[in-house]
Image (cartoon, rainbow, N blue to C red):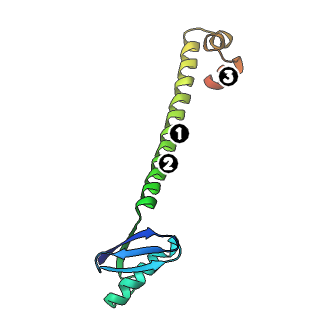
C-alpha cells in the first residue's frame, strides 16, 4: 500500500495542503476537511480509490498540541498511580502502628488524623 503525506499550513482563510510525493497542492476550508481534500488529490492524480493508500496529515502546530495533550494524559496516569501508591502506603503505616500495639486513638494522634480515619485505613471498627 502506498503512503502519502499531507503537510497542512493555515493562511488567513484556508488550509493549504502540500503532498510532497506528488509535488502538488490543494486546499481546504476547515482542518477536518484536510484529509478528504488530500485523499481526493492523490486519488485523482494517481487514478486510484481514495481508500487504497495510507495518508498521514501533518501540521506543526496541531502536531505539537497533540503531543502536549498526550503528555498531559501521561501525567494524569502517573498521578493516578502516585495517588494509589500513597493510599496503599497510608494503609500500611496505619496497620503497622496498630500491629506495634498502638490503639486506634494513639495511632490517630501520631498521624494527626481522626480515629475514624485510622479505622478506614486499617479496615477495623474502633
Label 2 vs 3, first from the N-terminus: 2
Label 1 vs 3, first from the N-terminus: 1
SS for callout 1: helix
Label 2 vs 1, first from the N-terminus: 2
Residue at the spot 45% in from the left edge and 47% down from the top edge: 71
Using the numbered discs, state the Cα–Cα distance from disc 1 to disc 3 in whole angstroms: 21 Å
**Number of the label disc, if any, that sits on residue 80:** 1
Residue at the spot 50% in from the left edge and 48% down from the top edge: 73
Image quadrant occupied by the N terminus? bottom left
Q: Against 69, is 89 above or below?
A: above
Q: Residues within 10 Å of mark 3 (few under 14, many from 20)?
A: some
Please name whichever residue, 79 or 98, is drawn nearer the observer in this view of the structure.
79
Q: Quadrant of residue 119?
A: top right
Residue at the spot 53% in from the left edge and 28% down from the top edge: 86
Please say whether residue 126 is visible from this viewpoint: no
Farthest residue, direction bottom: 47
Q: Percent position (x, y) of residue 49?
A: 38, 87
Q: Percent position (x, y) of residue 81?
A: 49, 37
Please name whichever residue, 90 or 120, is drawn nearer the observer in this view of the structure.
90
Residue at the spot 65% in from the left edge and 20% down from the top edge: 118
Depth check, mark 2 against mark 3: the one in front is: 2
**Number of the label disc, if any, that sits on residue 116:** none
- The reply, left or right, for residue 85 in relation to residue 106 is left
Residue denoted by label 2: 73
Residue denoted by label 3: 117
SS for callout 3: helix
Depth check, mark 1 against mark 3: the one in front is: 1
Q: Residues within 10 Å of mark 2 (few under 14, many from 20)?
A: few
Q: Percent position (x, y) of residue 108?
A: 65, 14
Amino acid at each position: 500500500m502506498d503512503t502519502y503525506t499531507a503537510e497542512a499550513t493555515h493562511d488567513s482563510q484556508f488550509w493549504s495542503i502540500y503532498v510532497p510525493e506528488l509535488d502538488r497542492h490543494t486546499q481546504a476550508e476547515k482542518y477536518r476537511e484536510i484529509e478528504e481534500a488530500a485523499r481526493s488529490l492523490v486519488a485523482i492524480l494517481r487514478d486510484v480509490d481514495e481508500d487504497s493508500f495510507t495518508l498521514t496529515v501533518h501540521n506543526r502546530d496541531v502536531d505539537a498540541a497533540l503531543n502536549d495533550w498526550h503528555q498531559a494524559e501521561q501525567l494524569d496516569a502517573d498521578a493516578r498511580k502516585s495517588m494509589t501508591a500513597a493510599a496503599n502506603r497510608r494503609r500500611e503505616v496505619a496497620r503497622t502502628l496498630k500491629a506495634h500495639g498502638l490503639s486506634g486513638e494513639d495511632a490517630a494522634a501520631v498521624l494527626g488524623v481522626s480515629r475514624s480515619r485510622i479505622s478506614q485505613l486499617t479496615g477495623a471498627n474502633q
